[in-house]
Amino acid sequence: MAVTHADLAPTPKASHLGSKTGAFLIVFCILLGLFCFILCLVAESARSEVKWTSDEGKGRESQCAYTGSGKLPLLSATAAFLALATAMVVQHTYLLVAVSKSDALLEMSWDLDSVFAKNLTRQAGFFFVATWMSFAVGEILLLIGLSVESGHLKNWATPRPSCLTIRQGLFTAAGVLGLLTVFLASGLYVTALRAEKYFQEGEIRRREMLEASIMYASPPRSPERSSIRAAPSESPLPRQDHSVLTLYHYLRAFDKHSSLV
């Protein structure tokens, strides 16, 4: 079985961009945004409405009463609010950790002369600002719906002179903004991943060019120098004969020293 370069490449850690954990978290946050959208549709369909009653013959003013207690839209809007907040916190926390550990993105922040780096910086800025604006408006709409629906949980069928209701489409707009928020945050993740891969490929190309330049810049060895360097290592005598001659000279020198003494 052949071994490819992808098999030898190190697996990205869980806290790095492009890891399986990052892909799982992004998909999970998109599902949370879709869940938030569905809950907002449920809250929109079950939102409380007002019916008016008037007794003109008795001289009484018109009074209003709610068509429901608002428990279902309140619970749905609360769950949608928490789902959207969870998705936003998870996505941006992971992006913050992953970007802080990416050397390529830190290099891009200092590379002000690269056109590609400038374009990616603008795209990341757009996704970041648009994500937070969409999230803020969606959460504000959900808070408005929550405050209105929680105001008539008790005695909702009792006639009263004024009734506060939300306009049609408020929960739907909040759901659309919540779904848009998670997709914009996913776009920010993809932009950061593109930047990291671009600078990693550039680093690999620079290393290959440096290695090639070093290899071609070194002068080639001439055959004469190679033969001269190889000459001292060559000897007509075997290795064992060298050791015998050395022992013979040592014994002879020792005998001369003994005779002098």
Image: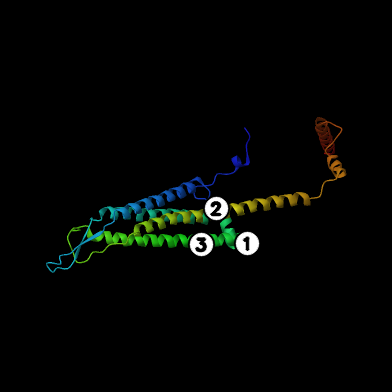
In the rendered structure, the answer to whether residue 164 lies left or right of residue 17 reads: left
Which residue is under mark 2? 193
Quadrant location, the N terminus: top right
**Residue found at the far front of this picture:** 57
Q: Is residue 16 above or below residue 137?
A: above
Q: Tell me the crowding category of disc 1: few under 14, some 14 to 19, or many 20 or more residues within 10 angstroms, Cα based.
A: few
Residue where numbered disc 3 is placed: 126
Residue 89 showing in the rendered view: no
- Binning the other alpha carbons within 10 Å of mark 2 as few (below 14), some (14 to 19) or many (20 upward) gives some
Q: Position of residue 52 (x, y in %)?
A: 21, 62
| Rendering quarter of residue 88 | bottom left
What amino acid is at disc 1?
A: Val
Q: Amino acid at mark 2?
A: Leu
> Between residues 82 and 75, which one lies in front from this camera angle?
75
From the viewer's perspective, is 169 left or right of 70? right
Q: Which residue is mark 1?
A: 115
The disc labelled 3 sits on which kind of residue? Phe
Q: Residues within 10 Å of mark 3 (few under 14, many from 20)?
A: some
Q: Is residue 213 above or below residue 143?
A: above
> Of label 3 and label 1, which has the lower sequence position?
1
Q: Is residue 20 visible?
A: yes
- Measure how far apart labels 3 and 1 are at the Cα level: 17 Å
Residue at the (35%, 53%) spot, across then down: 41
Which quarter of the rendering shows the C terminus? top right
Tell me the CA gap for discs 1 and 2.
Answer: 17 Å
